[in-house]
Image (spheres, rainbow, N blue to C red):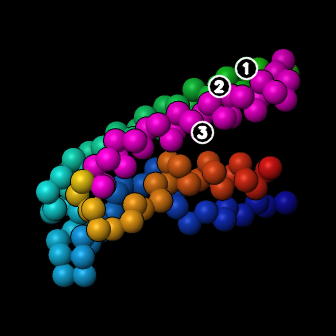
Amino acid sequence: TFEREDSRLPLLTPLTPVPMSPTGPSAENAEGGGSLAKEHAKALADAKDVVQEQVQLLRAGLHGMNRTETSELLRDTCQTLSDLTTGLDNLWKKAHPELPQPPWPVNVIPEEELARIG
């Protein structure tokens, strides 16, 4: 059977400009917007590295890891991915205090996938 991806958010995607207000400048042109784009790119690169490392650990321990160890590895992975967006959160609040924080794909996709598998 072919599995369909439900998430509309690609994990590794460049930050798209978000308007500060209906008539205001985009995130890229706003004060701190360049920093936000750089932090987002760094978080994505770091997330890719983290996921690759954890996949290797899962594959290596596939036959020797019990359910608790596997769950702990997945929780640690999600926590690490969440930690990667702390800088993004802070920069977003500084650049866009009046806007709600966007859902960062680095966090949303793992949450969706883990919720689906329970």
For marks 3 and 2, the one nearer the N-term is 2
Give SS at disc 2. Answer: helix
Q: To which quarter of the image does residue 21 belong? A: bottom left
Q: How many numbered marks does the figure carry?
A: 3
Q: Position of residue 95 (x, y in %)?
A: 23, 57
Give SS at disc 3. Answer: helix
- Badge 1: how crowded within 10 Å, few (<14), some, or many (20+)? few
Q: Position of residue 111 (x, y in %)?
A: 63, 51
Given contact means CB atoms under 8 Å apart, are the residues at marks 1 and 2 in contact? yes
Q: Is residue 56 above or below residue 97?
A: above
**Residue picked out by circle 2:** 56
**Residue picked out by circle 1:** 60
State which region is magenta: 64-93
**Residue picked out by circle 3:** 78
In percent of the image, x 46 and y 54: which residue is there?
Answer: 104
- Nearer the observer, disc 3 or disc 2? 3
Nearest the eye: 58 or 116? 116
Whether residue 62 is visible: no
Given contact means CB atoms under 8 Å apart, are the residues at marks 3 and 1 in contact? no
Horizontal arrangement in the rendering, residue 68 relative to residue 5 (left or right): right
Type of the residue with mark 1: Ala
Whether residue 97 appears in magenta in the rendering, the answer is no
